[in-house]
Image (cartoon, grey):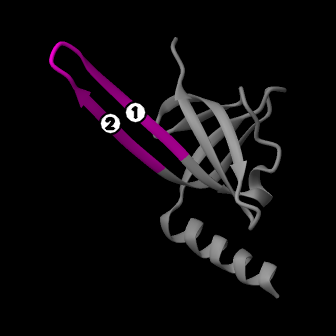
Amino acid sequence: MTTAIFNSLNNGVTAAFGELVTWTDAAGSVREIKGVVFDESTSFRLEQASVDGRHLSVDVKASDASKIAHGDALTVRGESFEVEDALSDGEGMIRVRLVETTV
């Protein structure tokens, strides 16, 4: 029963807030999956230095990307990223943390 409830919630969240991202795994297989994108910028200013950072993550359904792993590639909003890590919430969703790739 609990699993059915979480599956229903996960489907609703990705349907309402998700957008298509392109996932390329280590073997080169490419597929489009739907995920909820979190794009946050941070900035620290000190007297003589500043640090700017961007933290991008995508929440995807585990049923769509159960094998997503460190080193895989994701294209989000036309930008290329590498999977830093993928953390399951144990309830059917995976938080994929990304780092920008340099070309």
Total labels: the figure holds 2
Was residue 7 drawn as part of the magenta stretch in this picture? Answer: no
In terms of secondary structure, where does tag 1 sit? Answer: strand
Q: Which mark is residue 25?
A: none
Residue 28 spot, x, y in % from top left:
79, 26
Residues under numbered marks 1 and 2 in contact, where contact means CB atoms less than 8 Å apart: yes
The amino acid type found where label 1 is placed reads Arg
Our reading of the magenta stretch's main secondary structure is: strand
Work out which quarter of the rendered image holds the N terminus and state it: bottom right
Q: Residue at x 76, y 57 (%)?
A: 62
Q: Which residues are magenta?
A: 38-57
Nearer to us of marks 1 and 2 is 2
In the image as oriented, which residue stretches furthest toward the front? 47
Residue 34 spot, x, y in % from top left:
61, 55
Q: Residue at x 63, y 77 (%)?
A: 9
Quickly name the residue at label 2: 42
Q: Residue at x 40, y 33 (%)?
A: 54
Give the alpha-carbon distance from disc 1 to disc 2, as whole Å: 6 Å
- Mark 2 Cα within 10 Å, few/some/many (few <14, many 20+)? few
Relative vertical location of residue 16 with respect to residue 62 in this rendering, above or below: below
Relative to residue 30, is residue 75 drawn left or right? Answer: left
| Mark 1 / mark 2, whichever is N-terminal | 2
Question: In terms of image quadrants, where is residue 63?
Answer: bottom right
Residue 77 spot, x, y in % from top left:
46, 40
Q: Residue at x 80, y 33 (%)?
A: 29
Q: Which mark is residue 54?
A: 1
Relative to residue 3, is residue 76 drawn left or right? Answer: left
Which residue occupies the foreground of this view, 89 or 92? Answer: 89
In the image as oriented, which residue stretches furthest toward the left? 47
Relative vertical location of residue 103 with respect to residue 18 in this rendering, above or below: above
Was residue 47 drawn as part of the magenta stretch in this picture? Answer: yes
Relative vertical location of residue 59 with respect to residue 54 in this rendering, above or below: below
